[in-house]
Image: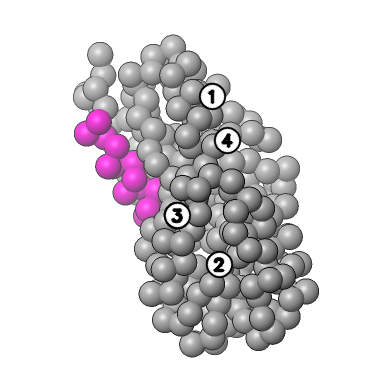
Amino acid sequence: MTGTPRLVTVAHGTRTAAGNEVARVLTRAAGERLGWAATTSYVELCAPLFSDVVAAASEAVVAVPLLLSTGYHLRHDLPAAVAAAARPHLVRLGPALGPDPHLAAAQADRLRAAGALPGQPVVMVAAGSTDPAALDDLDHAVHLLTEAWGAPVRLATLAGRGPRPAAVVRRGDAVSPYLLATGHFHRRARHDALAAGAHAVADVIGPHPRVAELVAARARALVPALAVA
């Protein structure tokens, strides 16, 4: 490969403007770390769409999903968009961003900022998925957060497989939303956690420096797979 590739991140997209801005901030920070040009894209609900970005690509692209676990978008939508591009050999698509120790470290920071206490039990609340592989990813994320936080962590999901917050959150628990950006699921996670008696509800993971480092590392890892014709 000659020259440097372009970083293209792909977030889910939301109707909440602040949620979409998280992806843009992370992309800019990761691009600065890499010294590469960087573009933010979305699966849906916000422009530019990933499918449009890769369709127009005329340079080598490393695509880093800002999605925290495996699911339909990663298995089907994103690969289909790459396959439909005019020059698909120029695009290398990475795996889900999570689970990863960088994310767990960011979650622990958010918990402390929300007033969670050392040793306090935590419930990690994820959006959820019907994909069995996603539940495996979430179980791994729980394990990583347990290590980073140093206290027991249990899992709840808002949709798909897994128990709901009302069945998992106990009075006095702290809650860590396993969500990158604010939006519908964030609002629901906070509401359900507080209704169940949570003592503290952390913010979303957001544009934490550890996440920007992770995006940059994922991009670098994709470079050897690029073969520019």
Point out the frontmost of discs 3 and 1. 3
Mark 2–mark 3 distance (CA, rounded to whole Å): 11 Å
Q: Name the residue under label 1.
A: 51
Q: Which amino acid does label 3 sit on?
A: Asp
Task: Look at the image and tell me in which quarter the C terminus lies.
Answer: top left
Nearer the observer, disc 2 or disc 4? 2
| Disc nearest the viewer among 1 and 2 | 2
Specify whether residue 65 is in view.
Answer: yes
Marks 3 and 1, the one that precedes in the sequence:
1
Q: Which of marks 4 and 3 is in front?
A: 3
Residue 198's place in the image compared with 32, above or below, is below
CB-based contact (under 8 Å), mark 1 and mark 4: no
- Label 4, residues with CA under 10 Å away: few <14, some 14-19, many ≥20: many
Q: Which residue is drawn at 44% across and 23% down?
A: 82
Answer yes or no: do the residues labelled 3 and 1 have beta carbons within 8 Å?
no
Residue 152 image offset from top left, x and y in percent: 48, 80
Q: Which of marks 1 and 4 is nearer the N terminus?
A: 4
Q: Give the range drawn in magenta.
A: 211-225
* Residue 8 included in the magenta stretch of the image: no
Left or right of residue 130, residue 32 in this image: left
Residue at the spot of label 2: 155
Secondary structure beneath label 3? helix
User: How has the structure been colored for display?
Assistant: one colour
Q: Name the residue under label 3.
A: 137
The CA span between labels 2 and 4 is: 27 Å
Q: Which of marks 4 and 3 is nearer the N terminus?
A: 4
Residue at horizontal 64%, vertical 73%? 168
Can residue 32 be seen in this snapshot?
A: no
Reading the image, the residue beneath label 4 is 42
* Residue drawn where x is 74% and y is 76% of the image: 196
